[in-house]
């Protein structure tokens, strides 16, 4: 959820423990009709292993995840949005440590399984209150 | 300040109450339902990754409600098809079926 843009969307993230911050890549921002040139805020240089050096803007956002039928966990973050560029056109958006640091993550590649336990969240909402 | 350092919190959204955030993100039951629908699409890709790459080599796929609804070499063209079919972009999972995945870090 990007309150500043009035935009709510579902995003498939690539989990990246090497990313300081959750980042929206053009593969998603473009399809959601986000025009980088019209975003508010100053342009910064984004540096990462994934994406190399790109220009970015940072917007407040809320990310929500579900433990299906139990809880919705919401996080208040600063979302980096990258300027479209051919070299990063095919890279998925990254879920970074601003969120991952609040989870217990188990990576079991032999079983093709990645599991998360929420240790903390900014906001927790039961799916079926009461 | 390091260029990747998190900026100082100031955006008018910090410190919102639980109720105020709920107003922004909406009904938890609807989020739960919507993410379940989206999960059908991401699960289709993760469960049938190899088959999809074989069937749609190096194409962009638009997956909605667990079904491939549009595909093509150009993301723009696929998105136009998504629009033409009246599918919601914000709930459509867009995925590139790369035959040789791009190295993310070399």
Image (cartoon, rainbow, N blue to C red):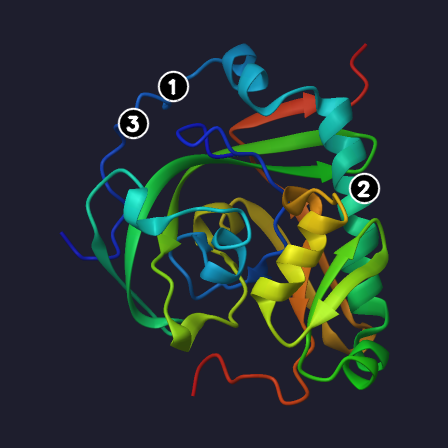
Helix, strand or loop at disc 3? loop
Horizontal side of residue B74 vs A81, given as left or right? right
Q: Which mark is residue B15?
A: 1
Q: Horizontal and vertical percent for residue A55?
A: 26, 61
Comparing labels 2 and 1, the label whose residue is closer to the camera: 2
Q: Which residue is drawn at 52% across and 51% down?
A: A100
Horizontal side of residue A9 vs B44, given as left or right? left
Q: Residue at x 62, y 65 (%)?
A: B77
Q: Which mark is residue A49?
A: none
Relative to B90, residue A16 above or below: below
Asked whether residue A116 is in view, the answer is: no
Marks 2 and 1 share the same chain: yes
Residue sitting at the far left: B1
Horizontal side of residue A109 vs A16, given as left or right? right
Q: How far apart are marks 2 and 3 (CA)?
A: 31 Å
Comparing labels 3 and 1, the label whose residue is closer to the camera: 3
Asked whether residue B91 is in view, the answer is: yes
Quadrant location, the C terminus of chain A: top right
Q: How far apart are marks 2 and 1 (CA)?
A: 29 Å
Q: Horizontal and vertical percent for residue B81?
A: 70, 57
Q: How crowded is mark 3: few (under 14 residues within 10 Å), some or many (20 or more)?
A: few
């Amino acid at each position: 959820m990007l309150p500043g843009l009035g935009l709510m969307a579902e995003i498939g993230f690539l989990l990246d423990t090497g990313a300081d911050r959750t980042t929206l890549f053009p593969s998603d921002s473009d399809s959601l009709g986000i025009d980088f040139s019209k975003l508010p805020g100053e342009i910064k240089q984004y540096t990462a292993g994934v994406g190399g050096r790109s220009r970015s803007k940072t917007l407040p956002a809320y990310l929500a995840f579900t433990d299906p039928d139990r809880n919705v966990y919401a996080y208040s973050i600063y979302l980096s949005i990258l300027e479209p560029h051919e070299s990063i056109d095919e890279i998925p958006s990254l879920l970074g440590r601003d969120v991952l640091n609040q989870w217990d993550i188990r990576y079991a590649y032999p079983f093709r399984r990645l599991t998360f336990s929420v240790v903390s969240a900014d906001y927790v909402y039961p799916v079926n209150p009461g | 300040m390091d260029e990747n350092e998190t900026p100082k919190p100031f955006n008018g959204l910090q410190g919102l109450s639980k109720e105020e955030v709920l107003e922004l993100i909406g009904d938890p039951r609807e989020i739960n339902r919507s993410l379940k629908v989206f999960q059908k699409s991401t699960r289709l890709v993760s469960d049938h990754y190899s088959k999809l790459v074989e069937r749609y080599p190096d194409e962009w796929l638009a997956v909605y409600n667990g079904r491939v609804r549009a595909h093509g070499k150009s993301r723009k063209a696929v998105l136009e098809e998504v629009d033409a079919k009246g599918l919601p972009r914000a709930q459509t999972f867009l995925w590139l079926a790369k035959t040789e995945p791009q190295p993310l870090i070399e």
